[in-house]
Image: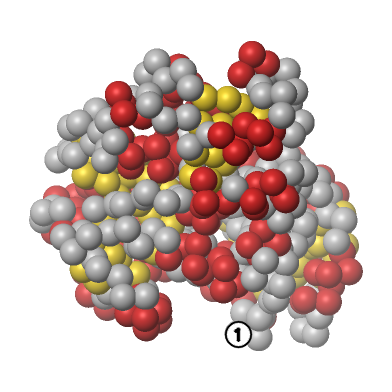
Amino acid sequence: MVSINNLKKLSFLVYGLGSSGKSVVNFFQRNNIKNYQVWDDKNLNLYQNKRPNNLEGALNKVDHIVLSPGISLNKSKNRKVLKKYKKKIITDLDIVFLTKNFSKSVVITGTNGKSTTCKILAHVLKKRYKVLLGGNIGIPILNLKIKKKNLLIIEASSFQLAHSKFIQPDYALLLNITNDHLDWHGNLKNYIYSKFKIFENQKQNQYSLLNKKFKKLFKKKRLKSKLILPQLSKYLKLKHLVKNSYLKSDINNENMSYVFTLSKLLKINEKTFFNSLISFKGLPHRYEIFLKKKNCIFVNDSKATTFQASKFALENSKNILWILGGQPKKNDKFFLKNLKNNIIKSYIIGKNVKFFKHQIKNGISYSITKNLRQTIIQIMKDIKLLNKKRLTILLSPASASFDQYLNFEKRGEEFKRLIRYYAQRSI
Protein backbone atom coordinates (compact mmCIF):
# COMPACT_ATOMS: atom_id res chain seq x y z
CA MET A 1 0.00 0.00 0.00
CA VAL A 2 1.23 3.49 -0.91
CA SER A 3 -0.11 6.57 0.86
CA ILE A 4 -1.12 9.68 -1.06
CA ASN A 5 2.04 11.36 0.26
CA ASN A 6 4.19 8.57 -1.15
CA LEU A 7 2.26 8.73 -4.42
CA LYS A 8 3.44 12.34 -4.67
CA LYS A 9 7.03 11.08 -4.82
CA LEU A 10 6.31 9.08 -7.98
CA SER A 11 6.04 10.33 -11.56
CA PHE A 12 3.33 9.43 -14.08
CA LEU A 13 2.32 9.81 -17.69
CA VAL A 14 -1.42 9.47 -18.34
CA TYR A 15 -1.81 7.98 -21.83
CA GLY A 16 -5.28 8.51 -23.33
CA LEU A 17 -7.65 11.30 -22.31
CA GLY A 18 -11.06 9.70 -22.52
CA SER A 19 -13.26 9.53 -19.43
CA SER A 20 -10.85 7.17 -17.64
CA GLY A 21 -7.76 9.26 -18.42
CA LYS A 22 -9.48 12.47 -17.36
CA SER A 23 -10.51 10.83 -14.08
CA VAL A 24 -6.85 10.04 -13.36
CA VAL A 25 -5.87 13.67 -14.02
CA ASN A 26 -8.73 14.90 -11.82
CA PHE A 27 -7.61 12.53 -9.04
CA PHE A 28 -4.06 13.88 -9.25
CA GLN A 29 -5.32 17.45 -9.12
CA ARG A 30 -7.64 16.80 -6.14
CA ASN A 31 -4.79 15.20 -4.20
CA ASN A 32 -2.15 17.75 -5.15
CA ILE A 33 -0.07 15.20 -7.07
CA LYS A 34 1.89 17.40 -9.46
CA ASN A 35 4.48 15.13 -11.03
CA TYR A 36 2.48 13.89 -14.00
CA GLN A 37 2.29 14.42 -17.76
CA VAL A 38 -0.42 13.55 -20.28
CA TRP A 39 -0.63 12.26 -23.83
CA ASP A 40 -3.44 11.60 -26.27
CA ASP A 41 -2.88 10.61 -29.90
CA LYS A 42 -5.86 12.65 -31.14
CA ASN A 43 -6.66 15.35 -28.59
CA LEU A 44 -3.67 17.67 -28.80
CA ASN A 45 -5.20 20.62 -26.96
CA LEU A 46 -6.28 19.15 -23.61
CA TYR A 47 -3.92 19.86 -20.66
CA GLN A 48 -1.37 21.35 -23.05
CA ASN A 49 0.87 22.54 -20.21
CA LYS A 50 1.25 18.90 -19.13
CA ARG A 51 2.02 17.48 -22.58
CA PRO A 52 5.70 16.52 -23.15
CA ASN A 53 7.54 17.61 -26.27
CA ASN A 54 9.06 14.16 -26.67
CA LEU A 55 6.85 11.16 -25.82
CA GLU A 56 9.56 8.51 -25.71
CA GLY A 57 11.78 10.68 -23.55
CA ALA A 58 8.93 11.19 -21.12
CA LEU A 59 8.03 7.48 -21.02
CA ASN A 60 11.66 6.66 -20.31
CA LYS A 61 11.77 8.94 -17.26
CA VAL A 62 8.42 8.36 -15.51
CA ASP A 63 7.79 5.66 -12.89
CA HIS A 64 4.39 4.65 -14.25
CA ILE A 65 2.39 4.97 -17.47
CA VAL A 66 -1.35 5.08 -16.66
CA LEU A 67 -2.89 3.61 -19.81
CA SER A 68 -6.54 4.21 -20.66
CA PRO A 69 -8.54 0.96 -21.08
CA GLY A 70 -9.50 1.37 -24.74
CA ILE A 71 -5.93 1.70 -26.01
CA SER A 72 -4.56 -1.47 -27.59
CA LEU A 73 -0.79 -2.02 -27.61
CA ASN A 74 -1.22 -3.74 -30.98
CA LYS A 75 -3.11 -0.90 -32.66
CA SER A 76 -1.96 2.31 -31.00
CA LYS A 77 -0.17 4.89 -33.12
CA ASN A 78 2.74 4.66 -30.66
CA ARG A 79 2.59 0.91 -30.11
CA LYS A 80 6.34 0.36 -30.52
CA VAL A 81 7.35 2.77 -27.81
CA LEU A 82 4.51 1.66 -25.51
CA LYS A 83 5.61 -1.97 -25.83
CA LYS A 84 9.17 -0.91 -25.07
CA TYR A 85 8.04 0.47 -21.71
CA LYS A 86 5.29 -2.11 -21.10
CA LYS A 87 6.59 -2.95 -17.61
CA LYS A 88 5.73 0.57 -16.48
CA ILE A 89 2.09 0.41 -17.61
CA ILE A 90 -0.62 0.44 -14.96
CA THR A 91 -4.32 1.41 -14.94
CA ASP A 92 -6.67 3.59 -12.93
CA LEU A 93 -7.61 0.48 -10.91
CA ASP A 94 -4.00 0.15 -9.77
CA ILE A 95 -4.02 3.65 -8.31
CA VAL A 96 -7.08 2.74 -6.24
CA PHE A 97 -5.34 -0.33 -4.84
CA LEU A 98 -2.03 1.44 -4.33
CA THR A 99 -3.70 3.97 -2.04
CA LYS A 100 -6.21 1.42 -0.59
CA ASN A 101 -8.48 3.97 1.06
CA PHE A 102 -11.46 1.62 1.64
CA SER A 103 -12.60 -1.09 4.08
CA LYS A 104 -13.31 -3.96 1.68
CA SER A 105 -13.19 -4.43 -2.08
CA VAL A 106 -15.14 -6.57 -4.53
CA VAL A 107 -13.96 -6.72 -8.16
CA ILE A 108 -16.22 -8.34 -10.74
CA THR A 109 -15.31 -9.30 -14.29
CA GLY A 110 -16.57 -11.66 -16.99
CA THR A 111 -17.90 -11.43 -20.53
CA ASN A 112 -21.63 -11.17 -19.91
CA GLY A 113 -23.65 -9.75 -17.03
CA LYS A 114 -20.95 -7.80 -15.19
CA SER A 115 -22.91 -4.56 -14.84
CA THR A 116 -26.15 -6.20 -13.74
CA THR A 117 -24.30 -8.38 -11.22
CA CYS A 118 -22.51 -5.33 -9.79
CA LYS A 119 -25.80 -3.46 -9.50
CA ILE A 120 -27.60 -6.35 -7.80
CA LEU A 121 -24.75 -6.83 -5.35
CA ALA A 122 -24.63 -3.12 -4.49
CA HIS A 123 -28.41 -3.19 -3.98
CA VAL A 124 -28.22 -6.21 -1.65
CA LEU A 125 -25.34 -4.82 0.42
CA LYS A 126 -26.33 -1.16 0.72
CA LYS A 127 -28.26 -1.48 3.98
CA ARG A 128 -25.38 -3.13 5.81
CA TYR A 129 -22.36 -1.45 4.18
CA LYS A 130 -21.38 1.99 2.89
CA VAL A 131 -21.26 0.81 -0.73
CA LEU A 132 -19.58 2.62 -3.61
CA LEU A 133 -19.87 1.26 -7.16
CA GLY A 134 -17.77 2.26 -10.15
CA GLY A 135 -15.39 1.21 -12.90
CA ASN A 136 -16.40 -0.15 -16.28
CA ILE A 137 -20.06 0.21 -15.32
CA GLY A 138 -19.85 3.86 -16.39
CA ILE A 139 -18.41 5.78 -13.43
CA PRO A 140 -14.60 5.94 -13.57
CA ILE A 141 -13.41 4.59 -10.26
CA LEU A 142 -11.18 7.57 -9.51
CA ASN A 143 -14.13 9.94 -9.86
CA LEU A 144 -15.62 8.42 -6.70
CA LYS A 145 -14.89 10.10 -3.38
CA ILE A 146 -13.70 6.93 -1.67
CA LYS A 147 -13.45 6.91 2.13
CA LYS A 148 -12.01 4.42 4.57
CA LYS A 149 -15.48 3.20 5.62
CA ASN A 150 -16.53 2.26 2.08
CA LEU A 151 -17.05 -1.19 0.66
CA LEU A 152 -15.91 -0.71 -2.92
CA ILE A 153 -17.50 -2.66 -5.79
CA ILE A 154 -15.62 -2.39 -9.08
CA GLU A 155 -16.66 -3.65 -12.50
CA ALA A 156 -13.40 -4.43 -14.30
CA SER A 157 -13.03 -4.89 -18.04
CA SER A 158 -10.47 -7.16 -19.65
CA PHE A 159 -8.85 -4.00 -21.05
CA GLN A 160 -8.19 -2.72 -17.53
CA LEU A 161 -7.10 -6.06 -16.13
CA ALA A 162 -4.70 -6.79 -18.99
CA HIS A 163 -2.32 -4.08 -17.77
CA SER A 164 -3.12 -4.00 -14.06
CA LYS A 165 -0.25 -4.80 -11.70
CA PHE A 166 -1.44 -3.93 -8.18
CA ILE A 167 -5.10 -4.93 -8.11
CA GLN A 168 -5.80 -7.05 -5.01
CA PRO A 169 -9.51 -7.44 -4.20
CA ASP A 170 -10.79 -8.98 -0.99
CA TYR A 171 -13.40 -10.72 -3.15
CA ALA A 172 -12.74 -11.38 -6.85
CA LEU A 173 -15.55 -12.69 -9.08
CA LEU A 174 -14.99 -14.11 -12.57
CA LEU A 175 -18.51 -14.70 -13.91
CA ASN A 176 -18.01 -16.25 -17.35
CA ILE A 177 -15.79 -16.12 -20.42
CA THR A 178 -16.92 -16.34 -24.03
CA ASN A 179 -15.41 -14.99 -27.27
CA ASP A 180 -15.25 -11.20 -27.05
CA HIS A 181 -12.74 -8.41 -27.67
CA LEU A 182 -10.46 -10.81 -29.54
CA ASP A 183 -9.49 -8.03 -31.93
CA TRP A 184 -8.01 -6.20 -28.89
CA HIS A 185 -6.45 -9.20 -27.11
CA GLY A 186 -5.36 -11.11 -30.21
CA ASN A 187 -6.74 -14.49 -29.18
CA LEU A 188 -8.95 -16.23 -26.61
CA LYS A 189 -5.99 -17.36 -24.48
CA ASN A 190 -4.84 -13.76 -23.97
CA TYR A 191 -8.41 -12.75 -23.16
CA ILE A 192 -8.75 -15.49 -20.52
CA TYR A 193 -5.39 -14.66 -18.98
CA SER A 194 -6.30 -10.97 -18.75
CA LYS A 195 -9.43 -11.93 -16.80
CA PHE A 196 -7.38 -14.14 -14.47
CA LYS A 197 -5.26 -11.19 -13.41
CA ILE A 198 -8.11 -10.39 -11.04
CA PHE A 199 -6.77 -13.21 -8.81
CA GLU A 200 -2.99 -12.98 -9.16
CA ASN A 201 -2.16 -10.60 -6.29
CA GLN A 202 -4.69 -11.95 -3.81
CA LYS A 203 -3.53 -13.28 -0.44
CA GLN A 204 -4.59 -16.36 1.51
CA ASN A 205 -7.27 -14.49 3.46
CA GLN A 206 -8.98 -13.24 0.28
CA TYR A 207 -11.61 -14.99 -1.84
CA SER A 208 -11.88 -16.00 -5.50
CA LEU A 209 -15.25 -16.96 -6.99
CA LEU A 210 -15.30 -18.56 -10.44
CA ASN A 211 -16.99 -21.20 -12.56
CA LYS A 212 -15.81 -24.75 -11.94
CA LYS A 213 -14.67 -25.13 -15.58
CA PHE A 214 -11.79 -22.73 -14.78
CA LYS A 215 -10.77 -24.58 -11.61
CA LYS A 216 -7.87 -26.39 -13.37
CA LEU A 217 -6.38 -23.13 -14.64
CA PHE A 218 -6.75 -21.58 -11.18
CA LYS A 219 -4.87 -24.52 -9.64
CA LYS A 220 -2.26 -24.52 -12.42
CA LYS A 221 -1.44 -20.90 -11.65
CA ARG A 222 -0.97 -21.78 -7.95
CA LEU A 223 -2.99 -18.82 -6.83
CA LYS A 224 -3.05 -18.18 -3.08
CA SER A 225 -6.60 -17.05 -2.37
CA LYS A 226 -9.50 -19.16 -1.10
CA LEU A 227 -11.26 -20.68 -4.09
CA ILE A 228 -15.07 -20.70 -3.96
CA LEU A 229 -17.16 -22.37 -6.68
CA PRO A 230 -20.68 -20.89 -6.58
CA GLN A 231 -23.29 -23.65 -6.59
CA LEU A 232 -26.07 -22.81 -9.05
CA SER A 233 -28.15 -25.70 -7.72
CA LYS A 234 -28.20 -24.20 -4.21
CA TYR A 235 -29.51 -20.89 -5.53
CA LEU A 236 -32.12 -22.57 -7.75
CA LYS A 237 -33.54 -24.44 -4.75
CA LEU A 238 -34.30 -21.07 -3.14
CA LYS A 239 -35.21 -19.16 -6.29
CA HIS A 240 -38.92 -19.43 -5.49
CA LEU A 241 -38.23 -16.84 -2.76
CA VAL A 242 -37.37 -14.21 -5.39
CA LYS A 243 -40.33 -11.81 -5.66
CA ASN A 244 -39.06 -9.82 -8.62
CA SER A 245 -40.19 -10.59 -12.19
CA TYR A 246 -36.93 -9.32 -13.73
CA LEU A 247 -34.75 -11.53 -11.54
CA LYS A 248 -37.00 -14.56 -12.00
CA SER A 249 -35.84 -14.78 -15.60
CA ASP A 250 -33.48 -17.71 -16.18
CA ILE A 251 -31.10 -15.27 -17.87
CA ASN A 252 -29.91 -14.14 -14.43
CA ASN A 253 -29.58 -17.54 -12.73
CA GLU A 254 -25.85 -18.16 -12.97
CA ASN A 255 -24.79 -14.64 -12.03
CA MET A 256 -27.35 -14.59 -9.22
CA SER A 257 -25.66 -17.66 -7.77
CA TYR A 258 -22.47 -15.58 -7.47
CA VAL A 259 -24.30 -12.75 -5.72
CA PHE A 260 -25.99 -15.22 -3.38
CA THR A 261 -22.69 -16.94 -2.54
CA LEU A 262 -20.86 -13.65 -1.95
CA SER A 263 -23.68 -12.25 0.18
CA LYS A 264 -23.25 -15.21 2.53
CA LEU A 265 -19.50 -14.56 2.77
CA LEU A 266 -20.37 -10.96 3.68
CA LYS A 267 -22.75 -12.12 6.45
CA ILE A 268 -26.04 -11.27 4.72
CA ASN A 269 -28.70 -13.73 5.89
CA GLU A 270 -31.10 -15.35 3.42
CA LYS A 271 -34.17 -13.43 4.56
CA THR A 272 -32.41 -10.08 4.13
CA PHE A 273 -31.01 -11.19 0.77
CA PHE A 274 -34.35 -12.15 -0.77
CA ASN A 275 -36.23 -9.21 0.75
CA SER A 276 -33.71 -6.78 -0.72
CA LEU A 277 -34.27 -8.17 -4.23
CA ILE A 278 -37.93 -7.10 -4.28
CA SER A 279 -37.07 -3.46 -5.01
CA PHE A 280 -34.27 -4.09 -7.54
CA LYS A 281 -34.78 -2.65 -11.02
CA GLY A 282 -32.85 -4.03 -13.97
CA LEU A 283 -30.42 -1.97 -16.01
CA PRO A 284 -31.57 -0.56 -19.37
CA HIS A 285 -30.55 -2.35 -22.57
CA ARG A 286 -30.12 -5.73 -20.78
CA TYR A 287 -33.19 -7.82 -21.60
CA GLU A 288 -35.25 -4.75 -20.76
CA ILE A 289 -38.98 -5.40 -21.14
CA PHE A 290 -40.05 -1.81 -21.73
CA LEU A 291 -43.49 -2.24 -23.32
CA LYS A 292 -46.36 -4.74 -23.32
CA LYS A 293 -49.21 -4.11 -25.71
CA LYS A 294 -52.03 -6.55 -26.43
CA ASN A 295 -50.33 -9.78 -27.48
CA CYS A 296 -46.82 -8.29 -27.86
CA ILE A 297 -43.87 -7.98 -25.49
CA PHE A 298 -41.09 -5.61 -26.57
CA VAL A 299 -37.57 -6.30 -25.29
CA ASN A 300 -34.52 -4.06 -25.60
CA ASP A 301 -31.38 -6.20 -25.32
CA SER A 302 -29.07 -3.81 -27.16
CA LYS A 303 -26.18 -4.62 -24.79
CA ALA A 304 -25.96 -8.09 -26.38
CA THR A 305 -22.91 -7.53 -28.60
CA THR A 306 -22.00 -11.21 -29.17
CA PHE A 307 -24.01 -14.28 -30.04
CA GLN A 308 -23.41 -15.75 -26.59
CA ALA A 309 -24.98 -12.64 -25.05
CA SER A 310 -27.98 -12.88 -27.41
CA LYS A 311 -28.30 -16.60 -26.71
CA PHE A 312 -29.57 -15.91 -23.19
CA ALA A 313 -32.46 -13.84 -24.58
CA LEU A 314 -33.23 -16.35 -27.34
CA GLU A 315 -33.34 -19.21 -24.84
CA ASN A 316 -35.72 -17.41 -22.54
CA SER A 317 -38.29 -16.11 -25.03
CA LYS A 318 -40.86 -17.69 -27.34
CA ASN A 319 -42.36 -16.67 -30.70
CA ILE A 320 -39.55 -14.21 -31.30
CA LEU A 321 -39.29 -11.56 -33.98
CA TRP A 322 -35.52 -11.12 -33.66
CA ILE A 323 -33.63 -7.98 -34.73
CA LEU A 324 -29.91 -8.58 -35.16
CA GLY A 325 -26.96 -7.10 -36.98
CA GLY A 326 -24.24 -4.51 -36.65
CA GLN A 327 -20.49 -4.86 -36.37
CA PRO A 328 -19.71 -8.52 -35.56
CA LYS A 329 -17.06 -9.49 -33.03
CA LYS A 330 -13.94 -11.30 -34.22
CA ASN A 331 -14.37 -15.09 -34.52
CA ASP A 332 -17.98 -14.96 -33.30
CA LYS A 333 -20.11 -17.92 -34.42
CA PHE A 334 -23.83 -18.57 -34.06
CA PHE A 335 -25.16 -21.90 -32.79
CA LEU A 336 -28.90 -21.76 -33.39
CA LYS A 337 -29.80 -25.43 -33.69
CA ASN A 338 -31.63 -25.64 -30.35
CA LEU A 339 -33.06 -22.12 -30.62
CA LYS A 340 -34.78 -22.25 -34.01
CA ASN A 341 -38.13 -23.25 -32.55
CA ASN A 342 -38.15 -20.06 -30.46
CA ILE A 343 -37.68 -17.77 -33.48
CA ILE A 344 -40.45 -16.98 -35.95
CA LYS A 345 -38.48 -14.52 -38.05
CA SER A 346 -35.30 -12.44 -37.97
CA TYR A 347 -34.53 -8.97 -39.33
CA ILE A 348 -30.97 -8.08 -40.32
CA ILE A 349 -29.80 -4.49 -39.85
CA GLY A 350 -26.46 -2.80 -40.40
CA LYS A 351 -23.67 -2.96 -42.94
CA ASN A 352 -22.60 -6.59 -42.46
CA VAL A 353 -25.62 -8.35 -43.97
CA LYS A 354 -23.55 -11.09 -45.63
CA PHE A 355 -22.04 -12.20 -42.32
CA PHE A 356 -25.41 -12.48 -40.56
CA LYS A 357 -27.11 -14.20 -43.50
CA HIS A 358 -24.39 -16.85 -43.36
CA GLN A 359 -24.77 -17.28 -39.58
CA ILE A 360 -28.55 -17.77 -39.55
CA LYS A 361 -28.98 -19.71 -42.80
CA ASN A 362 -30.98 -22.94 -42.93
CA GLY A 363 -34.23 -22.85 -41.04
CA ILE A 364 -34.75 -19.27 -39.89
CA SER A 365 -36.87 -16.93 -41.99
CA TYR A 366 -35.31 -13.48 -42.38
CA SER A 367 -35.71 -10.06 -43.96
CA ILE A 368 -32.91 -7.63 -44.76
CA THR A 369 -34.24 -4.38 -43.32
CA LYS A 370 -30.97 -2.42 -43.04
CA ASN A 371 -31.97 0.04 -40.28
CA LEU A 372 -34.18 0.12 -37.22
CA ARG A 373 -36.87 2.35 -38.71
CA GLN A 374 -37.44 0.07 -41.71
CA THR A 375 -37.31 -2.92 -39.39
CA ILE A 376 -40.00 -1.63 -37.05
CA ILE A 377 -42.27 -0.71 -39.97
CA GLN A 378 -41.89 -4.28 -41.33
CA ILE A 379 -42.45 -5.82 -37.90
CA MET A 380 -45.71 -3.92 -37.44
CA LYS A 381 -46.93 -5.39 -40.74
CA ASP A 382 -45.82 -8.89 -39.70
CA ILE A 383 -47.58 -8.64 -36.33
CA LYS A 384 -50.88 -8.18 -38.16
CA LEU A 385 -50.15 -11.15 -40.46
CA LEU A 386 -49.38 -13.39 -37.48
CA ASN A 387 -53.02 -13.04 -36.37
CA LYS A 388 -52.85 -12.20 -32.65
CA LYS A 389 -50.23 -14.83 -31.78
CA ARG A 390 -48.36 -13.97 -28.55
CA LEU A 391 -45.09 -12.45 -29.75
CA THR A 392 -41.76 -11.25 -28.36
CA ILE A 393 -40.22 -8.44 -30.39
CA LEU A 394 -36.56 -8.64 -29.45
CA LEU A 395 -33.65 -6.35 -30.26
CA SER A 396 -30.65 -8.51 -29.39
CA PRO A 397 -28.14 -7.62 -32.11
CA ALA A 398 -25.32 -10.11 -31.33
CA SER A 399 -22.90 -7.43 -32.51
CA ALA A 400 -21.44 -4.05 -31.69
CA SER A 401 -23.29 -0.89 -32.72
CA PHE A 402 -20.47 1.10 -34.26
CA ASP A 403 -21.46 0.66 -37.90
CA GLN A 404 -24.62 2.71 -37.27
CA TYR A 405 -24.58 4.07 -33.70
CA LEU A 406 -22.13 5.66 -31.29
CA ASN A 407 -22.75 2.92 -28.71
CA PHE A 408 -25.24 0.25 -27.64
CA GLU A 409 -27.10 2.79 -25.48
CA LYS A 410 -27.89 5.00 -28.48
CA ARG A 411 -29.02 1.94 -30.42
CA GLY A 412 -31.30 0.79 -27.60
CA GLU A 413 -32.82 4.24 -27.07
CA GLU A 414 -33.56 4.55 -30.78
CA PHE A 415 -35.25 1.14 -30.76
CA LYS A 416 -37.47 2.08 -27.81
CA ARG A 417 -38.39 5.44 -29.35
CA LEU A 418 -39.39 3.88 -32.68
CA ILE A 419 -41.34 1.05 -31.06
CA ARG A 420 -43.35 3.44 -28.92
CA TYR A 421 -44.12 5.63 -31.93
CA TYR A 422 -45.16 2.86 -34.34
CA ALA A 423 -46.82 0.54 -31.81
CA GLN A 424 -49.13 3.32 -30.70
CA ARG A 425 -50.33 3.71 -34.29
CA SER A 426 -50.35 0.08 -35.45
CA ILE A 427 -51.29 -2.24 -32.58
Please report the residue visible at 68 percent of the width from the left and 37 percent of the height from the top.
Answer: 56
Q: Nearer the viewer, residue 112 or 223?
A: 223
Can residue 242 be seen? no
Q: Is residue 17 above or below residue 121?
A: above
Give coordinates of residue 316: x percent, y percent.
51, 69
Asked which colour scheme the image uses, the reply is: secondary structure
Horizontal arrangement in the rendering, residue 181 relative to residue 62 (left or right): right
Can residue 295 be seen? yes
Please report the residue visible at 27 percent of the width from the left and 46 percent of the height from the top.
Answer: 105
Determine which quarter of the picture holds residue 339.
bottom right
Q: Amino acid at mark 1?
A: Asn
Please report the residue visible at 58 percent of the width from the left and 25 percent of the height from the top.
Answer: 37
Q: In the rendered view of the protein, which quadrant contains the N terminus?
A: top left
Residue for badge 1: 338
Horizontal arrangement in the rendering, residue 40 relative to residue 134 (left or right): right
Q: Nearer the viewer, residue 128 or 220?
A: 220
Please report the residue visible at 52 percent of the width from the left and 51 percent of the height from the top.
Answer: 87
Give coordinates of residue 41: x percent, y percent.
74, 34
Give coordinates of residue 43: x percent, y percent.
73, 26
Q: Is residue 355 above or below residue 149?
A: below
